[in-house]
Structure formats: C-alpha cells, structure tokens
Amino acid sequence: MAYENFDEWNGVKKKLNIHNRDLLFKEGEIWWCSVGLNIGEEVYGKGKSFRRPVVVLKKLSHNSCVVMPTTTKQHEGTWYHHLNIGKKDRWVMLNQIRFISANRLYVRESILLPGDFAEMKKSVAELLGL
C-alpha cells in the first residue's frame, strides 16, 4: 500500500471531523462507515471514502458508538461471527471492535434480527472472556 494513501485518508478524515450530521442509529444496525486507512492487521475501508460496513454493537451517545467491521470473505474461528443478511453472507470481525464518532457513519444498510444480534453479542462476550 502506498504511503500517499495515508495522505488521502487524512484529507477524508478532516472533512469527516467538520461534517456534523444528525443521525439516528441503533444497536444491531449495519452502516457503511469510513473506517479509514489503518496500519498492521487493523482492517481498513475501501474506495475514495475508505468505507466498509460495520455492525453497531453499542450506542454510547448521540454522537458515538462501538462497532465491528464486516467482511464478505469467509472466515472460521472465534474471531469471526457469521451472519446471513438477505441472502448475503457476512462475517463480523469481532477482533476489530472499536469506538467511533458517529461522523464516520454514512448510510444504514440493514438491521439485524433480534436473535441474530443476540447470538453475535454472545460471540463477542466469548471472545473477550466476559
């Protein structure tokens, strides 16, 4: 990955920081989110806005939440939780849990069924030893 992409992400991040939106988001929803360009094994977003879908795990305030990114690549193991959303398979990357500003959220994609959300939260608790 080229270093100039970090400069591109920095430009996007500056715009996100000043762009306050009044969003209504809830736990168990999947949103497109500008997760950025990160380092090492940290997952990153794609495209000009460095976005990928995330599951809102916990709403902390009107402007912040805890999310987990998703992927369409099949994964096995305790770091991932499989979801089937409208005939689409997704894997939640439990090991990539993070706090974000709601400014990073772009558009809601879907809402998890209550049972699916509860099962995913059990997977998170098991991974974290709670």
Image (cartoon, grey):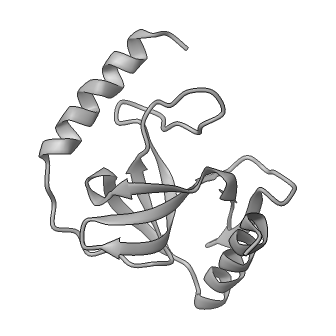
| Residue 110 sits above or below residue 77 on the image | below
* Image quarter hosting the C terminus: bottom right
Q: Residue furthest front?
A: 130
Quarter location, residue 25: bottom left
| Residue 80 sits above or below residue 113 on the image | above
Residue 31, position as x, y percentages in the image: 42, 62
Q: Residue furthest right?
A: 77
Q: Residue at x 39, y 78 (%)?
A: 26
Residue 93, position as x, y percentages in the image: 67, 54
Most foreground residue, 85 or 117: 117
Q: Residue at x 61, y 73 (%)?
A: 86
Task: Tell how many labels.
Answer: 0
| Residue 10 sits above or below residue 120 on the image | above
Residue 123, position as x, y percentages in the image: 75, 72
Quarter location, residue 124: bottom right
* Image quarter hosting the N terminus: top right
Most foreground residue, 40 or 130: 130
Q: Is residue 79 left or right of residue 39?
A: right
Q: Residue at x 35, y 36 (%)?
A: 49
Residue 87, position as x, y percentages in the image: 67, 69
Q: Residue furthest bottom?
A: 114
Quarter location, residue 61: bottom left
Q: Residue at x 24, y 73 (%)?
A: 62
